[in-house]
Image (tube, rainbow, N blue to C red):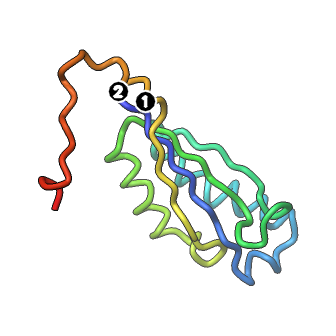
Amino acid sequence: MFRHTYFLHLKPTARWIGMSPLERSHYIATELFPVFARFPTVMMRFFDGEYYSPQVCDVVMLETNDLPAYHALLDALAASSLSEMCGISHIIPTVESSMESYEAMPVGSEQPFSLEESV
């Protein structure tokens, strides 16, 4: 089974930019973290990005094997006040070590690729 990792790029709104660091920390602790806590099978890490890119203020990394919980978490975030603070500008989905899983497949089990079949 693959471990799915998603990188959510958050773009700040004027409301977020206007908040003090203390207000931001309070918002994250009281409004955002409780949403994440409802989905214990989705691990979350939070990264500051505003020092390196004007398009992204923060990056949230989500890791899970539980795709229904990931989908429910995104629904919960959409229903939260997050969009008033930071919009999600990009979601980059990744799969950990998928090449290793492919290389571990028994010889002859690969599906041949044909351009004619894909059109």
Residue at (43%, 30%) from the top-left corner? 99
Q: Which residue is mark 1?
A: 99
Residue 44 point in image, percent of width and height:
58, 43
Residue 90 point in image, percent of width and height:
55, 65
114 left or right, relative to 21: left
User: Which of the labelled discs sits on residue 3, or is there none?
Assistant: none
- Compared to residue 23, the image places residue 106 above or below, namely above
Q: CA distance from mark 1 to mark 2?
A: 5 Å
- Compared to residue 31, the image places residue 111 above or below, namely above
- Compared to residue 9, the image places residue 89 above or below, namely below
Give the quarter of the figure containing the N terminus.
top left
Look at the numbered disc 2 and give the secondary structure of its residue.
Answer: helix
Q: Which residue is mark 2?
A: 102
Q: How many numbered callouts?
A: 2
Residue type pointed to by label 2: Tyr
Residue 74 point in image, percent of width and height:
44, 59
Look at the numbered disc 1 and give the secondary structure of its residue.
Answer: helix
Residue type pointed to by label 1: Met
- Quadrant assignment, res 58: bottom right
51 left or right, relative to 64: right
Give the quarter of the figure containing the C terminus.
bottom left
Residue 75 point in image, percent of width and height:
40, 63
Tell whether label 2 touches label 1 (CB within 8 Å).
yes
- Local packing at callout 1 (Cα closer than 10 Å; few below 14, some 14-19, many 20+) is few
Q: Residue furthest bottom?
A: 14
2 left or right, relative to 15: left
Residue at (51%, 49%) from the top-left corner? 6
Residue at (36%, 39%) from the top-left corner? 66
* Depth check, front residue: 41 or 88: 88
Residue at (39%, 35%) from the top-left corner? 65
* Depth check, front residue: 96 or 105: 105
